[in-house]
């Protein structure tokens, strides 16, 4: 009679192998809540935010250095609006709205921020154009025109957010 031999082979752990992607994206990671949401910037509000940022950069670069008092106010409005819009871009890009479970009315918060930026941009571009025409400074005139365009972009974004806010209130 023949004897039978059974051999079991175990795979030895290989510490030099590349880690499995499923193992690296574990739920224990402190940054596992971050999900890049690039598709938002293909929508009308997302495109408006990019336009607001680009026009804000143009406004800040054309209005600096500020030699006159009205230009200081215009730069203040352009800079604070740029920073606020940049924060909202990161909120949407990183999916912070969906990740944070605080009782925040995100639409109303963004509506207030965008509405305040629109009102201040309207005041600021009028002041900028008055100062630039009085001193005949070409780059200040261009900054005022781009400020007008940015005021229009913020106003349209405020309108869209207002429509969204009213429809979300009606749904509740």
Image (cartoon, rainbow, N blue to C red):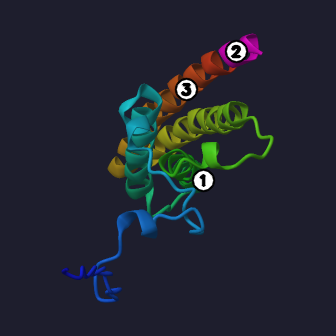
Residue 166 or residue 63, whichever sits in front: 166
Q: Would you say the residues marked 3 and 2 are in contact, meaning their CB atoms lie under 8 Å apart?
A: no
Secondary structure at numbered mark 2: helix
Q: Which residue is mark 3?
A: 155
Q: Earlier in the sequence, mark 2 or mark 1?
A: 1
Provide the secondary structure element on which disc 3 rests: helix
The kind of secondary structure element at disc 1 is helix
Q: Residue at x 39, y 34 (%)?
A: 47
- Estimate the spatial distance between the alpha carbons at disc 3 and disc 2, rounded to whole Å: 16 Å
Magenta range is 167-172
**x then y, percent, for residue 113:** 67, 39
Sequence-first tag of 3 and 1: 1
Q: Main secondary structure of the magenta part?
A: helix
Mark positioned earlier in the residue sequence (3 or 2): 3
> Could you tell me residue 6's position as x and y percent?
28, 79
- Give the Cα separation between the discs numbered 3 and 1: 16 Å
* Left or right: 166 in relation to 2: right
**Quick one: quadrant of the C terminus?**
top right
Q: Which residue is mark 2?
A: 166
Q: Is residue 30 above or below residue 119?
A: below
**Location of residue 136 with respect to 33 vertically, above or below:** above
Q: Residue furthest front?
A: 1
Q: Nearer the viewer, mark 3 or mark 2?
A: 2
Q: Nearer the viewer, mark 2 or mark 1?
A: 2
56 lies left or right of 107: left
Q: Furthest-left residue in view?
A: 2
Residue indicated by mark 1? 80
Q: Residue at x 55, y 65 (%)?
A: 31
Q: Total marks drawn? A: 3
Please tell me how crowded label 3 is: few (under 14), some (14-19), or many (20+) other residues with Cα within 10 Å: many
């Amino acid at each position: 009679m023949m004897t039978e031999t059974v051999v079991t082979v175990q795979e030895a752990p290989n510490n030099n192998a590349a880690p499995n992607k499923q193992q690296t994206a574990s739920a224990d990671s402190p940054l596992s809540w971050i999900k890049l949401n690039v598709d938002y910037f293909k929508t009308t509000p997302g495109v408006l935010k990019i336009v607001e940022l680009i026009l804000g950069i143009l406004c800040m670069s054309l209005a600096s250095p500020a030699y006159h008092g009205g230009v200081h106010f215009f730069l203040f409005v352009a800079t604070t609006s740029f920073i606020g819009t940049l924060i909202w871009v990161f909120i949407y890009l990183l999916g912070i709205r969906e990740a944070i479970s605080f009782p925040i009315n995100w639409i109303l918060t963004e509506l207030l921020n965008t509405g305040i930026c629109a009102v201040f941009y309207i005041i600021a571009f009028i002041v900028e154009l008055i100062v630039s025409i009085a001193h005949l400074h070409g780059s200040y005139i261009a900054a005022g025109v781009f400020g007008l365009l940015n005021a229009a972009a913020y106003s349209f974004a405020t309108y869209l957010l207002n429509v969204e806010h009213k429809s979300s209130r009606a749904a509740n």
